[in-house]
Amino acid sequence: MTLIETNELKKIYLLGENEVRALDNVSLKINTGEFVAVMGPSGSGKSTFMNVIGCLDEPTSGRYLLDGIDVSKMERDALAQIRNKKIGFVFQGFNLLPRTSALENVEVPMLYNNTPPRQRKDRAMWALKALGLEGREHHHPSQLSGGQQQRVAIARALVNDAPLILADEPTGNLDTKTSVEIMELFVRLNEENKITIVLVTHETDIASFSQRTIRFLDGHVISDKATKR
Amino acid sequence: MISIPSTFKISLRALRVNKMRSALTMLGIIIGVAAVITMIAVGKGTSEKLSQQIATVGSNMIIVLPGSTTAGGIRGGFGTQMTLTRADAEAIERECSAVLLVAPVLNGVAQVVYGNQNWSTGVYGTTEAMLEVRDWGLVAGRNFTEQDIRNSTKVCLLGQTVVDKLFGGMDPLQQTIRIKKVPFTVIGILESKGQSVIGQDQDDVIFIPLTTAQKRIFGTTMPGMVRTIAVKARSAQDLNRAEEQITQLLRQRHRIGPNQEDDFSVRNLTQMLDLAQQASKAMALLLAAIASISLLVGGIGIMNIMLVSVTERTREIGIRMAVGAKTWDIRLQFIIEAITLSLIGGMIGIVLGVIVTKFLSAFANLTTVISPFAVILSFGFSGLVGIFFGFYPAYKASLLNPIDALRYE
């Protein structure tokens, strides 16, 4: 089943007099349950691609179907709702709320879909437990290691049962050992929970955990094939 | 949409993180609300005190004073010449349609003696109408009768101060006191009226029949002379008409030509006090207006700090948007934060305002009245300040682009 389908996606920025084609006719399909690595040098358009499929940015033209729904022309608030229900984000800098406990950080997405407080807490506890963070629920991000912080962020991405996780250089701030742990976690979520994962990275080691690698250059897809192991 | 209690919790946490900053921001609102409450309390207290005093003078009161003497081009003040008579008073009552009651007065200061106590006080010779003209009741005994006036009986009514000074704890009724050595029987005790507008003790008086005062106490050169005439108009609307009628009548009776000055003067007491009250109300309003400016300044402080807060928390806003916060979720969060600031400030301000007000009435001898209306008004106003000054920063926050907000360092 197709989860992500883009059709001649274009994103053009105007930088002064110059037109920058961040995405130029990108047409792709990603199926449910795939683990895809998106690679490319900086400025290749991979980040823009992630922002568009993450419903954070609108394409200049083209069509984007997420789970069969055309979201390319949706309003701001409708997009927020789509992000809330369908997409879990994992960032390089973790992006947790400071001075807020792990538990409350994981509860944040549920604040925006009317989950009752009791259920919010239960689900957040469940997600933290699933990621091996039992006993750390009341720690603030500053009291957690990088790997633990990233796991809190993944718990936050899972808590609304989103079918898609978008991870933007999730191991960029982590040491090699922790990076491998986090990547194994993604593999497990992909295999056991059938969650579709799209991962941006520029490290081949990290990309090697995926099944499929898409390479970007100057706004174009230059290669799209099974990942070499 | 995000639930209000959850938002409120987020706001409280955000405010706790910057305790000092939140406290200083609130200070503006605290001072504003406290100032509004104190000013309204002082203003209301003053005007209430005035209206009480107006009530003690007697409603719809006009007082007629005699004119001045002129001797060799030197003019004395009002009252230096006795130009009014009891007949004038009777004529006013008879002929002026706007007048309800008239009480002529002949007064002076006299030494009064009871047993081994003595006291100098104001002795007023008047008629039985006096009590009604001044809206003055008796706590014990009876008023004069027409017969007392006609027969110049030696009876008197005592004010509370005189009772206290002469009798201590004893019952003065039917006792005999001496006024300028003339024995008088106490037949009534006046109720207490307290201080007048100018701070005079209104209870330091003795009323005796006018005729007795004329014949026995203040033996005047011309019989029938009175010092002042107290007049009660039919209603507040009749005050001006009564004033005109009295002036016209007395000019006629005193045979004053068209170009001559009056040899008497008519004063509308109630109107003077009303003016004083209006002035005090205007003053109170002005003070409250000035105080509310400080509330406004406090509001600007809130807006300032909320704008800083939005900038500082750009990344937080980006995270919230990424995980599904909608425009109004973000707006509500910051508006509720501003309202929380201003309402907590408002509550502290109310407490402070009440304390300052109590302090003022205890130590600065000011009459103050804390009205629930002022409290609700200033509390509500501080809430509105929060909404008003919180809206722009919240609006700004909600317009952020999630991608830029997430990347904000």
Image (cartoon, rainbow, N blue to C red):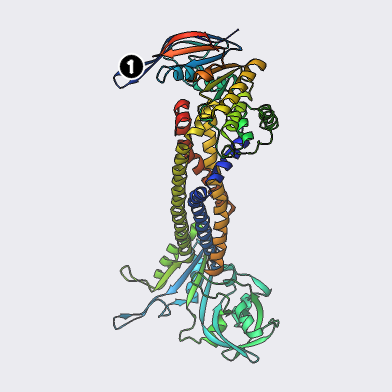
Say which of B241 and A98 sits in front: A98
Q: Identify the residue at image location x=52%, y=76%.
A: B105
Q: Is residue B379 above or below residue B97?
A: above
Query: Is residue A27 among the parts visible in the rendering?
Result: no
Image coords of residue B355 (percent x, y) = 57, 60
Say which of A214 and B359 sits in front: A214
Q: Identify the residue at image location x=46%, y=38%.
A: B312
Q: Circle 1: is it few (<14), some (14-19), or many (20+) Cα within 10 Å? A: few
Instruction: Report the quarter where the C terminus of chain B lies.
Output: top left
| Left or right of residue B155: residue B60 | left
Q: Chain of mark 1?
A: A
Q: Amino acid at mark 1?
A: Glu
| Left or right of residue B318: residue B151 | right
Say which of A182 and B199 sits in front: A182
Instruction: Report the quarter where the N terminus of chain B lies.
Output: top right
Image coords of residue B324 (percent x, y) = 56, 25
Q: Is residue B255 above or below residue B403?
A: below
Query: Is residue B190 among the parts visible in the rendering?
Result: yes
- Label 1 belongs to which residue? A19
Q: Is residue B175 above or below residue A69?
A: below
Under circle 1, the secondary element is strand
The quarter holding residue B178 reads bottom right
Image coords of residue A71 (percent x, y) = 51, 14
Image coords of residue A62 (percent x, y) = 45, 10
Q: Is residue B82 above or below residue B339?
A: below
